[in-house]
Structure formats: C-alpha cells, structure tokens
Amino acid sequence: MKKLFLFFCIVFFACQPKKKDITNVEIGERTDPHSFSEPDKAIVKHLDLELRVDFSSHTISGKATWDIQNVSEADSIVFDTHQLKIDKVTLNGLAEAAGYTLGRENKILGKALTIKITPDTKKVSIWYKTAADAAALQWLTASQTAGKKHPYLFTQSQAILARTWVPCQDSPGIRFTYRAHVSVPKELMAVMSAVNPQMRSKDGTYTFEQKKPIPSYLMSLAVGDIDFKEIDARTGIYAEPSVLQKAAWEFADMGKMVAAAEKIYGPYQWGRYDVLVLPPSFPFGGMENPMLTFATPTVLAGDRSLVNLIAHELAHSWSGNLVTNATWNDFWLNEGFTTYFERRIIEEVYGREEAEMQEVIGFNLLKATVAELGDKNDDTKLKGSFENRNPDDGVTDIAYEKGYSFLRLMEEAAGRNVFDAFVSEYFKGHQFKSIGTEDFVLYLQKNLIARDVKISDKVLVSKWIYEPGIPSNVIIPSSVKFRAIDSIIKSWDGSVKAGRLATKIKSTNERLYLISALPDSLSTHDLSLLDKDLGFTRSENTEIQCAWYTLALRSNYEKAYPEIEKYLINVGRRKLVLPLYKEMVKTEKGKKWAREVYLRARPNYHSVTFNTIDELLDDR
C-alpha cells in the first residue's frame, strides 16, 4: 500500500510532501491525535449503557458495559474520559474489581482511562458519574425552555465531548452499536440517536437500541417536556408542546427531502428520520445524530425559508453518519460532501434557482472566511492540522464551502451523471466505515480520475486539498435574482433610494444577499430608510437578524442596539452570535458593552458557544 501511495503522489501530486499511509480503520489502525485510545491493540464493538439522569445535581450516573475485541492480545484497553468520576471497573461481568489508572489531565483531551485486561477479556464495565459542568451536557431550568414548566437536558457530543458523559474510545474512526436503558423524572421524555418512543412512559424509564455502528460523536440524549408529531410514515418532529405544531408546519417537506436524497444517492439506511427541535441555547444549527437530528429553533422562521438546514442534516445520513471522516483533521470529508449533497436536495425539491442563491451565499461566506484567516493560513487547507488544538477550531466555512466548491468543480469536470455514479459508489463502498483524506485521494484516483485523466488537469486535486486559500480554478456561482439586486444597488448612486423594496426583494436569500452587498459608505440615515422599508431590525428571521445586526454594529446604527441585546441573550447558536461579538470588540466601548451583555447571556449558552466567546472576551 505504501508503494502504491508513494507512486501516486509522485505522478499526481509531485509538489506534495510524503503523506502518512493510512489503512483500514475497521480494526482501528488509524492514529487519531484527539483520542488517547489505542484501537490497534484493543477496540470497542458494542455498548450497553445504563443511565440515571438527576436534574437536582445536574449529573448523570451510570454503567457503561463495552464488548471489546482484543486485537493484539494486549494487557490493557484505553478509553477517553473528561470530567468523569470513575467509581469501579469490572471485567466479563464478574464482581471483582479490575485494575485501572487515570492519566494526567490534558486541557483539551481530558484523561486516559487505562484498564487492565487479559487476552480472553470480552466485556469491560465502567461505573461512573458526570461532572455538574460536563461540557457535553446543558442543563436548562424551566424558565429557559419554551414551555416554562419543566427543566431540560440535552447533549452535544461533537467533536470530542462524548467522553464527558460516556467513557468511550472517542474517535470518529471507531464505530460501535449500542443499547441504553435510561431513567428520568416520570413527567419527562427521553430520546436518543436510536429507535425512539413516540409516547412518554409512565414511570420515566426508556430503552433504546442503535443497531447500526456509529462513532461516539453521534451519541446523543435529550430529556424534557417533549411530544411527537408524525410528518409521514418515516419522518416526524419531537419538540416541546408549545413549539410542536409550528415546527411540524415548518418542516412539512421532510418526507419529500428524504425521497429526493434517495433518488440522488441511494437508499436511506437508518429506518426513521426524525427531528428534535431544542431550546434556543443549542449551539449549532443542527446536529446529525442518527435517526434523530437535533435542530435549533432559530430555523423556525414561519415561512420555511431556512429549511436547507434540514436538507443539510439529512444529507449527513450519507456523508458523515454512513461514511465518516476518520479523524477531525479530515472534517471536510463530512461537511464538504454534506454541503454538496444538501444543495442537490434543495435543487431537487425547490428548484435550481433556490440552489443557485444558496451557492452564491455560501461562496461569499467562504471568501469572507479566507479573508479573515488569511489566504496563506494553513487553516484554509481542506486537510486540517488540529493536533494540540480543539478540533472545533476546524468548524469553519473552509470545511463546508471550500469542500463544496472542490466537489462542485469535480462534478463540472466529470459531468454530473459520471460524478453522481462515483459518489453513489463511494457511499456504498464505504458504508459504516471511516475514511481519511489520503484514502479518499486514492479512491478518487482509482475510481474517477484514472478513467479520464483530463479530470485531474481540470480539478488540480492537490492544490485544493493540501494548499491554503481558494484556487484560481474555482467555479464562481451566480444568481439571476442576485444580479437584479446588484443593479438596484448600483442605481442608488451613493445613497439609498428606498420605497417599495419589500415588493422587489422578498425571499430570505434575497434579503441576506442585499445586506451582504450593501456598500460600506451608507449613512445611518440610509440604513434607517432600508430598515423602515424592509423591517430588518424587528425581523423574526435569525439569519437576517445576524446579518443586519452585524452591519448595524459596524455602521453604528444605534436604533438596532436594543434588539441586538435581546437577540444575544435569547439566541445560543454560536454561528449567529459570534459575528456580533467579534464586531463589538473592535472598539473599547463596544467591548465594554459586549461584556455587559455577555454577563446576562452566558448562562443561556452551551459550553461550545461560551468557550468561544470567553476566549474572544478574555473572560477565561
């Protein structure tokens, strides 16, 4: 394999340094810089989990029993933990305690849990308890929920936070099946990334099963005042009762999206596709937990204008959940493919014009990210390098939009039919496996480029994957509707000519583009005219709010400031609050204001969000 890979590098990537050979991950031969585990020696295969959720102490206590494979007859197996209290470990169901050690604390990775085993050890049981401030867990008071009646708990395991609530081999290159028995207050409902109940139990106990092997970052749990509503035979919505009907209306096209996705890239492998709409503090737009996407309520715009989020999380059922990035340095394989697939679903369900607008918005985000990071910055390479760093540093538009642009270029070079056949076989051939960037390059060479060498010349694979910035052969997307907006702005000739813009610029995408295209020279008077015409400041669309409020801060449009404060306190999605804080801290006055607002907002944020803002404001 090494000779084959080196030969390929010489022929196709002559300017590249030698890359490490990475082989079959099914038996754990990969090295993951974000995991202490040593899967080449002993690897997990199945988890039986018993959990008790305690809202009074903000802790989960439980027992994790792992079926393991001792690959090399090793005398130990290593798990990842962070903030966990380990009470006891046993082997093969015996009562006798087994020997174990906890390694030194690493700020990012936590502690290695090394358990003594023998060649015939088949099961390892770990009794443990989470910390009250476990990073994956967000405990909400009743007042922080939509219904205001009951507390709420949800998890966020990606990227390396599963280890804060389950002792595990916390690497995306390691997959396992699981069963779970969960006890919660009887008035609440529990759901997981597994086969879920559709009604509450009488005694607060729930049993779950996930028969498909998944990596640890796709482990999820939510507990709260949750009801269910069916969309169609295999899709539905979980949400708080006061949100359920609105969410079901907003996501009424979920079934159509699943059908469209299957039409493009083959059967949906997970049985049901349901969505849980979480309280506002959820830090991401969505999380692709198998069978149950966790979604932010910020996409409930009331006009179905932000449902591309559902298309994105659904697409992860193929790219990410079915075929997974081997390490977080290969994150673009998850997100680039998913963004590409998302837009194909959007095109199939809503038409090419809608997809084109989203392509342009995405490309503009990519350009802005590269401009912010610098086009020579290694973090603008598709193949990441996040050793000794939090892999969340890689959650930028590089993985999503540069990854998309690379795949879109391959589609153009090969032709859509040929490229679709390639991607379908890629998903089929790697299903329930993890794959690294170098593996993908070899697969690409063998299964696409070798059949038409001209594709290599058109795409410049090495430049896209291993070099920073945006390559010059990028396809620059365009939109007829956006060109019309450019013409409107050009006709202003230096100052806004408002009036009846609302009848010309209607959709969310058009309004987002308008805000992004506005010249820096606009006065607060001009912004006031636009605001009066289009109602940006009091919009209930969080994407529009984020874009407009960022512009308002940059332009000192103080009429929006009271709404900005409300927004920052009530919205916990990192993508939608971080740009505002970044703009605020550019001046001493703004930084003081940001600190004042943040004191009230931080209790409503998940650790994924507040850790980022803490660093920005130097409030660690």
Image: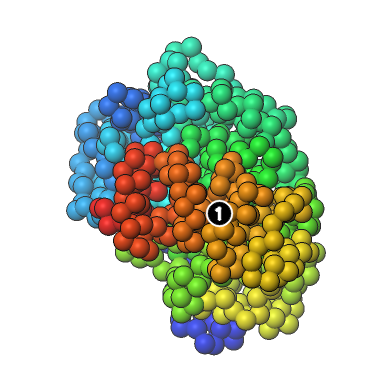
Secondary structure found at label 1: helix
Front in this rendered view, residue 108 or 310: 310
Q: Please identify the residue farthest to the front as the structure is shown.
A: 525
In the rendering, at what x and y percent does residue 144 appear?
Answer: 42, 30
Residue position marked by numbered label 1 in the rendering? 548
Q: Please identify the residue farthest to the top as the structure is shown.
A: 202
In the rendering, at what x and y percent does residue 315 appear?
Answer: 64, 50
In the rendering, at what x and y percent does residue 99 appear?
Answer: 20, 41
Front in this rendered view, residue 120 or 107: 107
Callout 1, which amino acid? Trp
Give the colouring mode of the picture: rainbow
In the image, what residue occupies the spot 41% across and 41% down? Answer: 569
Q: Is residue 224 visible?
A: yes
Front in this rendered view, residue 453 or 502: 502
In the displayed structure, does residue 90 sit left or right of residue 216? left
In the image, what residue occupies the spot 56% across and 34% down? Answer: 276
In the image, what residue occupies the spot 30% across and 54% down? Answer: 592
In the image, what residue occupies the spot 38% across and 38% down? Answer: 604
In the displayed structure, does residue 47 sit left or right of residue 519? left
Res 433 quadrant in image: bottom right
Question: How many numbered tags mark residues here?
Answer: 1
Q: Can residue 295 be seen in this view?
A: no
